[in-house]
Amino acid sequence: MTNESRIYLASRSPRRSELLTRIGVRFELLTPRMDNAEDVDETPLSGETPEAYVTRVTLAKARAGIRRIRDRKLTPHPVLAADTTVEIDGVIIGKPAHAADALAILRRLSHRSHRVLTAVALADGERTEHKLNISDVRFRAIGDDEIRRYVASGEPLDKAGAYGIQGYAAVFIEEIRGSCTGIMGLPLCETALLLRRFGYPA
């Protein structure tokens, strides 16, 4: 880590890296080693609300990042973590398990509104703070052929709710109420406010 870097980003998401870069935040990636299993269980708990779920997972990611710093004897800096989930009819929808799952998710979202919840947390080993962003997204009616072509592109397979607003799925969206960057995976307003609390001039 260079002296100019101020925080670690505990995420493999290229979108989160791009968004941090967009607002001039200096960071280094801090992720589990590729040969190790993920150290955060993202399985929803029984009866857990989408708000509680996404917040719990985000806080766990931030704390896991602090453990990595200590285990690897890295220079201490705050750790930024985030998690995004989609909710419709009270059901938490994460990343699709496979193409057939992505097809089913997108058919369910077609011609309806859903919520996108993104939590962001910042931890420095002594304190951890977090914020939650919730946006409403409405899809137009999507034909089955459109859905199949989109799934065949591979874009939906690593994204919560089986779509990415920054990609082709933007043509499905009729209306947004909330944060575009929150839907992308890192709400920049909330992120900047957290960074300022930790003394970073974002």
Image: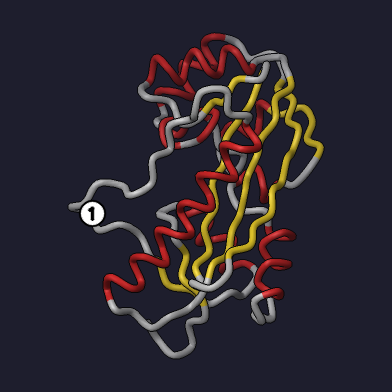
From this viewpoint, which residue is outermost toward the bottom? 3
Query: If the image is split into quadrants, where does the C terminus sit?
Result: bottom right
Quadrant location of residue 98?
Answer: top left
Q: Quick check: 154 left or right of 47?
A: left
The residue at 53%/53% (across/down) is 59
Q: Quick check: 53 left or right of 159?
A: right
From this viewpoint, which residue is outermost toward the left? 35
Task: Judge whether 145 appears above or below 97 on screen.
Answer: above
The residue at 71%/14% (across/down) is 111
**Number of residues whose C-alpha sits closer than 10 Å to that of mark 1, classed few (under 14), some (14–19) or many (20 or more):** few
The spot of residue 47 in percent (x, y) is: 57, 23
Task: Judge whether 113 appears above or below 32 on screen.
Answer: above
Task: Judge whether 147 appears above or below 169 on screen.
Answer: above
The spot of residue 140 in percent (x, y) is: 72, 19
The residue at 73%/40% (across/down) is 134
Q: Quick check: 130 left or right of 36?
A: right
Q: The residue under label 1 is which amino acid type? A: Met
Query: If the image is split into quadrants, where does the N terminus sit?
Result: bottom left
Q: Which residue is mark 1?
A: 34
Q: Nearer the viewer, residue 146 or 73?
A: 73
Quadrant location of residue 96?
Answer: top left
Task: Judge whether 188 appears above or below 135 on screen.
Answer: below
The residue at 48%/36% (across/down) is 159
The spot of residue 164 in percent (x, y) is: 56, 37
The spot of residue 52 in percent (x, y) is: 62, 38
